[in-house]
Image (tube, grey):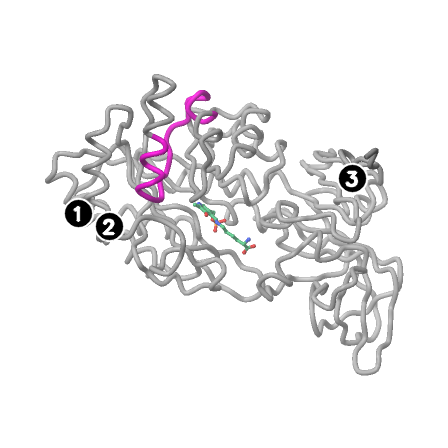
Amino acid sequence: ETGFSYRNGALFCEDVPVTELADKYGTPSFIYSRKAIETAFRDYDGAFGSHPHHILYSVKACSNIGIISLLAKLGSGFDIVSGGELLRVEAAGGDLSKVVYSGVGKTDKEIALALEKGIHCFNIESVPELNDIARVAASLGKVAPIAVRVNPNVDAKTHPYISTGLKNNKFGVAYEKTVELYKQAAAMPSIRVVGIDCHIGSQITELSPFADAEEKILDIVDQLAAEGIPLEHIDFGGGLGVCYKDEVPPSKREFVRLILDHLEARGYKHLAVTLEPGRSIIANAGILITRVIRDKTGETKNFAIVDAAMNDMGRPMFYEAWMGIVPAVPRDGATRTYDVVGPICESGDWLGRDRELCIEPGDVLAITSCGAYGMAMSSNYNSRPRAAEVLVSGSTSQVIREREKPEDLWRGEHLPTL
Ligand code: LLP
């Protein structure tokens, strides 16, 4: 269920034609299907059956408070990586006692904020961080709940920029040092050990890296049990991939089944499982709509110049990612091969290369599977106001983030008076 389909020759989001959304809200705009988001969450939730579990949506994938609020209402918790994300969850009405806080660079100020708001746990990524959290907690008269993010040294077989569970990555505590760190943590009066955590990467399309990581984590859980350090949950992070082009990732059900099978085989039938999915909740539930500005025939290539750019959707530029590009209303006629590019003054400003399209200026195109790491990674480069975000539910639609106005571009800037 992606929420997007063609009906009578026109692309719809749920029951609304995409061209109607382009006319009403302008372009470029991100369009999200409520049904697709809710289905993705429920698929995870349902796959666990009666096994105790926590699904924590990874806020970084798409941080709009409207999206957070939808998921909060379904019972989701949240994986955060900054004070800003914590305050977004609060602003959206999310339950802060269902928040876990990951990331290698939590500042004292962010740690104090999280302690004051009463989050579920800190996923700690180093000994110095453990010491800093213990110190801040003691100074506030609080006890900090923690899990250790273990680096299991497993190859997630994904793009190097989004692989996080290898020895040379900055993430997590070295596998061999983990038990020692737990012993230290367990002896600290301002620290309470509640779990263990790993996250090996993103856009993972095979099950084997997850299985390898889980086995290694369970080895540590065994050792901790022997040391008399019990855990309340195991967090396997996010990372399940989605289909952008022709990838065939495991289903959420298969992924969860794998986790539970390994857990049960090792005798941990009752240990709660936490997941931190981002992409697999929201990627396929969103598109970026854009209009063709101009059809430019270059020396060796044709360029479809559109009003969305790398500042709106940076994945092609960052990771050479392939994103689907489809017409809102396909034309009858011969196609030509185009590079689909934005107006930004960089050759890296491309959204798709060598695409067969039949287009005219003014046509609406949809860049598909843009719900994750689209708006969340957007910028104002070239003084481009950020796109609008629109949520569709059935035959209704609503702006959940207004398109930025030109004056928003220089908000907070000052003419010098010195
Ligand atoms: N938990 C932690 C600790 C993470 O670092 C991440 C993502 C997630 C959960 C969620 O992972 P997901 O389920 O979305 O794979 N900008 C890149 C992706 C970066 C992922 C960063 N960490 C992209 O567009 O491909």
Of 388 and 135, nearer the camera is 135
Residue at the disc numbered 3: 403
Residue at the disc numbered 2: 262
Residue at the disc numbered 1: 266
Q: Is residue 205 visible?
A: yes
Residue 83, compared with residue 117, is above or below; it is below
Rendered location of residue 84, percent (x, y): 56, 33
How many other residues sit within 10 Å of disc 1, few (<14), some (14-19) or many (≥20)?
few
Q: Is residue 130 magenta?
A: yes
Q: Horizontally, is 418 left or right of 260 in the view?
A: right
Rounded to the nearest angstrom, the CA distance separating label 3 from label 1 is 51 Å
Under circle 3, the secondary element is loop
Q: Which residue is drawn at 46% across and 45% down?
A: 277
What kind of residue is marked 1? Arg
Q: Does the residue labelled 1 lie within 8 Å of ligand 1?
A: no
Q: Which of marks 2 and 3 is nearer the N terminus?
A: 2
